[in-house]
Image (cartoon, helix red, strand yellow):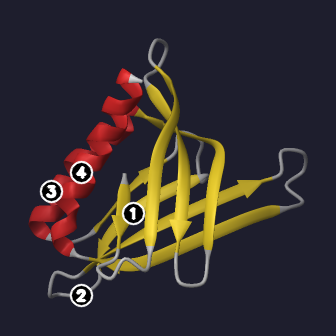
């Protein structure tokens, strides 16, 4: 799944690299981010539950109709990953935001936090919804 700004200078990519179908349907994702100043790939143990993805798709569909508010998808482990969409003005312009966070397991003496946000074409929400659906389909067929 790919999310880009209109001039394709900024991009977020999500790809499923593993899935759990039996116990609790969920997907481990690889995350790619590119801006004019930064480019990186993150292959951490970020898991998204199928229930959360389905709920997010429904909320994002409503957001697409109203272009009002803030909708976000969180990882199963709190605060590790967030993908959000919000309106940025009263004219229907919207932005996407991705946050990645990791803290040390021992005593939280170190942490990293990345937050990227950029404006996207409001008409791209439908293709983003389809991309979320395809994430699940590719994982289930792979």
Give me the disc on residue 122. none
Q: Write down the residue under mark 2.
A: 89
Dot 1: element: strand
Pointer 4 residue: 129
Is there CB contact under 8 Å for labels 3 and 4? Answer: no
Q: Residues within 10 Å of mark 3 (few under 14, many from 20)?
A: few
2 or 4: tag closer to the N-terminus: 2
Label located before the other in sequence (3 or 2) = 3
Viewer-side label of 4, 1? 4
Residue for badge 3: 62
Report how far apart the C-alphas of labels 3 and 2 lie in the structure. Answer: 17 Å
Task: Indicate the secondary structure of the residue bearing disc 4.
Answer: helix
Q: Residue at x 15, y 63 (%)?
A: 64
Q: CA distance from mark 1 to mark 3?
A: 14 Å
N-terminal-most mark, 1 or 3: 3
Q: Is residue 135 visible?
A: yes
From the top left corner, tell me how far across and down residue 67 is, in percent.
17, 71
């Amino acid at each position: 799944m790919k999310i880009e700004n209109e001039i394709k200078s900024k991009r977020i990519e999500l790809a499923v690299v593993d899935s759990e179908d039996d116990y609790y349907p969920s997907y481990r994702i690889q995350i790619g981010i590119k801006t004019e100043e930064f480019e990186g790939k993150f292959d951490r143990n970020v898991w998204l539950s199928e229930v959360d993805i389905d709920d997010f798709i429904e909320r994002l569909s409503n957001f697409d109709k109203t272009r009002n508010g803030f909708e976000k998808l969180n990882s199963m482990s709190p605060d590790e990953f967030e993908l959000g969409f919000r309106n940025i003005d009263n004219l229907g312009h919207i932005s996407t935001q991705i946050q990645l966070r990791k803290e040390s397991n021992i005593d939280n003496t170190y942490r990293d936090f990345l937050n990227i946000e950029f404006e996207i074409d409001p008409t791209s929400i439908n293709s983003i919804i389809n991309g979320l659906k395809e994430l699940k389909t590719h994982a289930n067929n792979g």
